[in-house]
Image: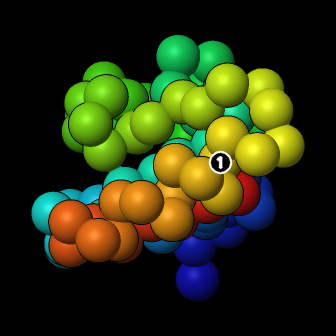
Amino acid sequence: MAVMTYREALNLALREELKRDPDVFVIGEEVGLYEGAYKVTQGLLKEFGPKRIVDTPIAESASPASASARPWSGCVPWSR
């Protein structure tokens, strides 16, 4: 059995879903350029680009508003 940290397991799961389904995207505060507070999204922006790894402003209303509009166009958000 492979031994990995929770961070590595989450990153691997996100990467697998992003590869499997082109409509899946990650949205949240500091998930792109900063690569997440705990580096869970490390490397995803470089691999999948800014249309699928979406930074939102640091505001409580920004993530839900952004995430709720995307599914209308067929996208599937994963938000932290």
SS at mark 1 in the image: helix
**The N terminus lies in which quarter of the figure?**
bottom right
Report the label total: 1
Q: Tell me the kind of residue under disc 1.
A: Ser
**Residue drawn at x 31%, y 44% as measured from the top left:** 52
Residue at coordinates 21% horizontally, 73% vertically from top-left?
A: 74
Answer with left or right where residue 42 lies relative to residue 28.
left
Most distant residue in the right direction: 60
**Residue 22 x, y percent position in the rendering:** 15, 63
Residue 12 visible at all: no
- Check the image and report above or below for 73 versus 66: below
Residue at 51% x, 65% y is 68
Q: Quadrant of residue 76?
A: bottom left
Q: Is residue 77 above or below residue 66?
A: below
**Residue extending furthest toward the top:** 33
Which quarter shows the C terminus?
A: bottom right
Question: Does residue 73 appear in the picture of this structure?
Answer: yes
* Residue 72, percent from left and from top: 29, 71
Describe the colour scheme in one phrase: rainbow
Instruction: Classify residue 73 by image quadrant.
Output: bottom left
Q: Relative to 52, does residue 10 appear above or below in the rendering?
A: below
Query: Residue 17, image x and y in percent?
Result: 33, 70
Q: Position of residue 6 (x, y in %)?
A: 75, 62
Task: Give 4 or 37, whichever is nearer the viewer.
Answer: 37
For this orientation, the residue located farthest to the bottom is: 1
Q: In this rendering, would 1 be left or right of 49?
A: right
In the rendered structure, the answer to whether residue 2 lies left or right of residue 59 reads left
- The residue identified by callout 1 is 63
